[in-house]
Amino acid sequence: QQQQQQQRQASGGVRSESDREESEERYERTILTVLGGLSLLVKESPENEGNNNSNKNKNNNSLVYSYLIVKGEDDDKKNGSEARVAAAAPLWRHLTSSRSPFRRATYSLLSDLSQHAPSLLHEGTDGDDIDMEAPTCSPGRSSGKTRQLPNLIPTVITSEHDPGNISKMLDFVLSYIASFRGVGDNTDAAWDPAADGIDPAKTVSALAKLFRRGCHGSPAVGWCPIALPLVASLPIPSGGSNAMQMKVLAALWEGKEYTGGGANEAAVVTAVVETATFLLLRRLEDSGSRGTGNEEKMSSDDAKEIAGYVFRGLEYYLTKSEDSRRDAATSSLKELCNALSRDLQRLDVVSDDTDGRKDCILFAVRVWFWADGGIRRVMLDSIMSHGDNGLVVERLGDVVRLAADGKNATKGSVGRLPPILRDCVSEAGANIVDPLSTPGSSEGSLLPPKEAEIHLMLEVLKFCGVSFVLNSAGDDPAQPTRDAESYILGAIVPWVVTLFSSSALSSKSAFSRDAYIEILCVCLESIPSLDDRRRIWASGLKDMVDAHVDLNFLTKAIVAIAKADDLNIVRCEALDEFAMQVGDAASMVFRNGAVRESGGVLDTMVDSDEFRSMRLLLQTFVGLSPVCSQVLIGEGVIQSWINVVCQQTEHDMILEDDVGSNVLLDLLLAVASTKSSHLCYSNLLRLTSQSWKEGGQIWTSRCWKLLKAHKDRERLLKELQDYAKAVLEQDLCMIDRHDEKSKPGKIDCMCLVWSNRCSRLFGLCGDASLVLAGLDNVQLWKSSYSSPLQEYRSGNRLFACLRYVLQSFDDPTERRKLLCGDMKSGDTATELTLHVLLSLVDASPSLVPFINSTRHHQCFKLFSLIGDAPREYLVAMCRQAVNIIANEMNVSIVSELTDHRSAQVINRSVALLDLLTAKLFGRRQAIVDSREAEISQHDVKEGDILFYVANDGSEVQTRVQCRVAKIHRDDYPNLYFTIRIDGEDGKATERQTVAGRLKKRAIATPPDSTLTTGAKESVEEGADMTALIVNSIIKPYLSREK
């Protein structure tokens, strides 16, 4: 600063523009800091008021700020009072400043001073100095500059044009007026200019001018809450006139047009309605006219004029256009609705002829206020002129709803507002109260009301009472049961059926659904007899169920009635029957869906919303839903559900529930898991057995936990294991005998489901064994490959089951142990494995010499699993294969013919023996002239069985059996052919080729490299095996030929 001062002196004392700006900023910051600091000071350390010691902890010194600000000055220059006045006056010197921030900070300071340090604004006694022992200084007449503050109020109101300062300024004016409380004996000291008060006429004119201009664009949501207390603080002349209040009220209403619309406009209307209601309800004694004979002088015209602003506010809310309503902030519009509903309810109570408030101006005009000239006219005219679009009805319903929520009177009590609301309902929709009175209407053909109309009907029923609304006389509550019953069964239920049944043309909103449910509850509650309520509910429920009303609607209706009324009403025979139907439907949905996903014949499914609704409804029945904790159905329904869940059908073999779709089973297991469950042991065993069959999430997350926690766990597990073994054995036979004409993929699906059940059984037993699964039945495997050729695939079915079981184990060692046990050389240990391999060999009599290339691919895969078995294990299998061949040949010798079954067994056994000996002793292969396999193109005939060279040009050929489907001669003399090749999955493929790639015979080309590499031959074992084959097979065969 010294440098800057030196620079200015060097430059001739001329200040630069930047210096001036910097000085201005410093000055502004200083003033604002001082004003803000003073505000904080008086807030933190306020003056004590009277003898009230509530602030003593904050103000231990009993501060009087008017004394402290002059402490230390020379009283000889000025007496103490004048010194305090002179020192306090600068606090509001910036009220008329041209700087908007200074005025705003001054408004805040003066507002705080009015509340926490009023001595600075009202101090001015002419007596001795203040006694510091006294906690306060009684305000009296002020003099000098102090008197300028009241005189400045109208000027400040008129001159303030900054929108950002309006709220602060009005808050200061209101606080300053309130600070006059207790000044002298005059209750209106603030408005007594002779006692240093404010001039009311000038102030009212200033406020009216300000409000008429919409407060110069200031956000109305900020200053509107101050309007009511400002009007309430205005003085009332001894004659009781409200002229000043009405002038401000009129200015407020006029100024709403200049607020910019939307939220600001709605806020102004709210302030007008609340202010007008206050003036109508204010006691006459509060205005100073009580007991003075001025009650009769109160002009009814003034009362009607004030009431007119309530009418205008109601009409504004009801009829405002949708665009304006949408533009308005939701909070401001809700505030207006809240104000209207609250004020109408209060005005209705005050207008009662007997218990009303007779000392308010409304009482004198109450008949006119509620009759055709007032509220009734506004509501009915608004509905008639704007009711087609539903907005007026909807908004009126909102007003009534909030009024009903805040109503303290008994339901059904009659005032002046209920008859008007009942007429509004009739005007909004002629068919709402008495739908059968509409021409052409009959039960079953009723047109439901619009959403807004039913909303209004609901709120009016809640506010006025059911009997009052439904009885045309209004004041005759006779036979309310008959009226409510006819309305429920003759109107509400048919409307629900029309709107929410499965045949409804369009879905309805959740709001409309809840409104109908609430009307149903309100009407039921109005019926005094418990038996009548139960009968009506049962009848209505039956009608809705028969019409297939939306499950979500029924769920919410059941829960709502159970909460609103006695549970004994909800629990009825109709509900039990409905619960049984829902259980049947849930079971059918699951079974049909499971069959479709598994490739079955059924394909019925429901959408996800209906599925969720069904689950929630079932949970509600048993008290396990989030919205209901009480059991609503009888034990007979539970038993019916168990029977449905556990029923046996033809599709049980493909019934698998990976994702937990069987909601009924899940629900029943959840019921069984509750402490209050009364399920008997037999039913629990049935449910757990069914869950074992279906598996999936319900088995792992629900049933398995139940089994572990049950008190009879050991017994339950034992019986469940026995049941599972019996089911697996039975299902395995069903798979073996299943019709070949089934839908594609169904057999494979059955095998997969069967293997999954095996895995769950292994988990129950804690061990894995083919004995548990029923696959240890040697006779079953024998029958699978000794049957006629056309039934050959039965071996594939059994192996498919075995394959899926083996695939459930990731470790090859565990798979080998499951199939072969400990791989000892005993006959029992090798017999099962041998017959499994025999079922997988594909051999026909004409191909026996070259059987190596026609072995089934599955056989090679399974053999690779046991390929590294002990040598003695493989030798034992060879011996058994030789015995089987010998036995079948002996049967043929005795019967002197070789039947088809024996040929199948012999061919398979020879093929398997060839595979085993190759593994043990290496491949011995006859030298065959490859030219013998060639075939001329002219020798090929349609239907011939030949062998197609799949990898022509390779050193080792792979030949695949095929059938010639067609011969093509369009390139004669060169012929080519369409051949059909049967795949391992049963599907046939066709391709075209030439005669050079077709062969008569199949050369041995094992697909597994482990079969082409011969093992070291044991001379002794080879000699023994050769001797066994010669003595058991060749010699008997040759002797038979002789």
Image: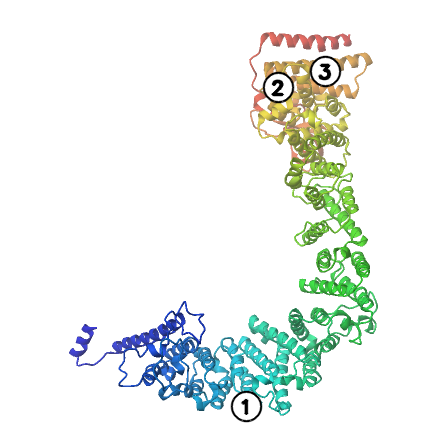
Residue hosting label 1: 237
Figure disc tally: 3
Quarter occupied by residue 118: bottom left
Amino acid tagged 3: Ile
The single residue placed furthest to the left in the displayed view is 10
Mark earlier in primary sequence (1, 3): 1
Give x and y (percent) for residue 811: 57, 28
Residue 744 drawn above or below residue 309? above
In the rendered view, how is the structure colored?
Answer: rainbow
Q: Which mark is residue 822?
A: 2
Task: Where is residue 681? Give x, y as percent.
Answer: 74, 36
**Is any part of residue 429 visible from this angle?**
yes
Disc 1/disc 3 C-alpha distance (Å)? 129 Å
- The residue that appears at 57% across and 90% down in the rendered structure is 241
Image position of 3 (left or right of 305): left
591 left or right of 807 in image: right
Q: Amino acid at mark 1?
A: Pro
